[in-house]
Image (cartoon, grey):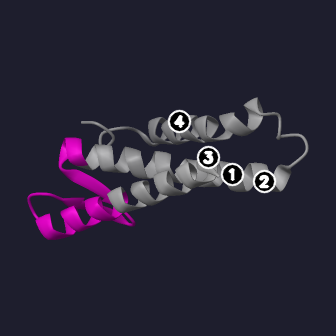
Amino acid sequence: MLWWDWKGSQRIGLLAAMLAVAALPWIMLGWLPHEWRAFIGGTAFLMLPLMFGWFLFIGLVTGRIPTRGGSETREIFPTWYWAVAATYAGFLMFFAWMIVSVVVD
């Protein structure tokens, strides 16, 4: 099954790939050597939507959404499952709004 049957090394590998994708804009724009604090903060900021999007995708495909300390299952706890899914979707919309507002200004 997607994500849930993966080994720890596969999960860490995926998160490392997400971190590399989040760091790529900073490296491509050439800000890496001069602005270390901005690099760290910007990479962390761009990593969050990738993680929330991936967790939401896993939850919608498998019916079991990752949460802090475990997971919520659609069949057993549908209210909590959809509350967590709505929270993740809300975070994604918030991040999209922040990125668009920076790009437009």
Give the CA separation, mark 3 to mark 1: 14 Å
In the image: residue 57, left or right of residue 73: right
**Secondary element type, mark 4:** helix
Query: Do callouts 4 and 1 mark residues in contact (Cβ within 8 Å)?
Result: no
Which comes sooner in the sequence, label 3 or label 1?
1
Q: Foreground: 101 or 27?
A: 101
Q: Residue at x 33, y 40 (%)?
A: 3
Residue flagged by tag 1: what amino acid is it?
Gly
Q: Nearer the viewer, mark 2 or mark 4?
A: 2
Q: Which SS class for mark 3?
A: helix
Lower sequence index among marks 4 and 3: 4
Label 2: which secondary element: helix
Above-or-below relation of 72 to 2: below
Per the rendering, the mark at residue 13 is 4
For the record, the magenta segment spans 60-88
Q: Position of residue 68 (x, y in %)?
A: 39, 66
Residue wearing tag 2: 38
Asked if 5 appears above or below 86 in the picture, the reply is above
Q: Label 2, label 4: how many angstroms apart (C-alpha)?
A: 24 Å
Report the side of 97 relative to 30 (left or right): left
Q: Say which amino acid is labelled 2.
A: Ala
